[in-house]
Image: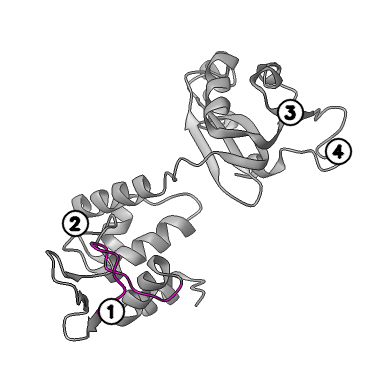
Amino acid sequence: MILKTLQDAILHFADTKNCIAYMADLRWPDGVIRCPTCNSEAVTFMPSRMLWQCKTRHPKRQFSVKVGTVLEDSPIALGKWLLVMWMLVNCRNGISSHEVARTIDITQKSAWFMLHRLREAMQGTGVPLADIVEADETYVGGRLKNKHVSRLKQGRYKDKTPVFGMVERGGRVVAQVVPSAHAANVLPIIAGNLSKEETVLFTDDYPIYDKVASLGFQHDTINHTQDRFVRNGIHTNTIENF
């Protein structure tokens, strides 16, 4: 089921059975429920407690869909966790703990705890990016036109935070704050997050990327002045959109 709006998510996750079914589909996509302790498929669902019980005798025979996840041991209802997940991945500008607290009626401290757990889980598996990857750097901060004239004289990037990012076309993203957009800061991130055997890296012609080929990666550039934005499939539009 596709939940397109916040209202859809609220109505769907208000039913505990829907929440359990949704989590079960994520954890066991083949439809076979397995005990997280012994991996046995001989389990029985207990509707009265919304738990499964493993037929093999061992500690922690009874388990829920939250066992082994970042939701484990949390007293917050599963429906509220799933609703915050939906908000976190669908709100383009991010969400604050205060907004979460108001929306699902919990304390700001609990909302802060939930968001930190979910963001930690979203960091990825550590598997290198592969296939076609685009890289670019940017500066995050206030708009130039909104700055006081005294700040304008200090340069367009004054007081802005440099961020370097890479995106696997159709897949994952790696982005992090860097001390500055210099090769010494950017090249180690490229080397540590790409698969040399399976990756073609596209960047613009900024000089910090001149030594990418020396790291052992296939590398091509797009010159936004001469080539505009796309040349034979080579572009950085995806990472710039991100």
Give yes or no for contact between labels 2 and 3 (Cβ–Cβ under 8 Å).
no
Q: Which mark is residue 219?
A: 3
- What is the residue that sits farthest to the bottom in this orientation? 48
- Mark 4 Cα within 10 Å, few/some/many (few <14, many 20+)? few
Amino acid type at image mark 2: Thr
Magenta stretch: residue 33 in it? yes
Does dot 3 land on a helix, a strand or a loop? strand
2 or 3: tag closer to the N-terminus? 2
Instruction: Give the residue at mark 2.
Output: 107
Instruction: Give the residue at mark 4.
Output: 231
Between the C-alphas of marks 2 and 1, the distance is 21 Å
Q: What range of the chain is rendered magenta?
A: 30-43
Between the C-alphas of marks 4 and 3, the distance is 14 Å
Taken as a whole, is the magenta stretch helix, strand or loop? loop
Amino acid type at image mark 4: Arg
4 or 3: tag closer to the N-terminus? 3
63 or 221: nearer the viewer? 63
> Which callout, 1 or 3, points to the residue nearer the camera?
3
Residue 221 visible here: yes
The answer to which quarter of the image holds residue 39 is bottom left
Please tell me whether residue 61 is drawn above or below residue 84 in the rendered image. below
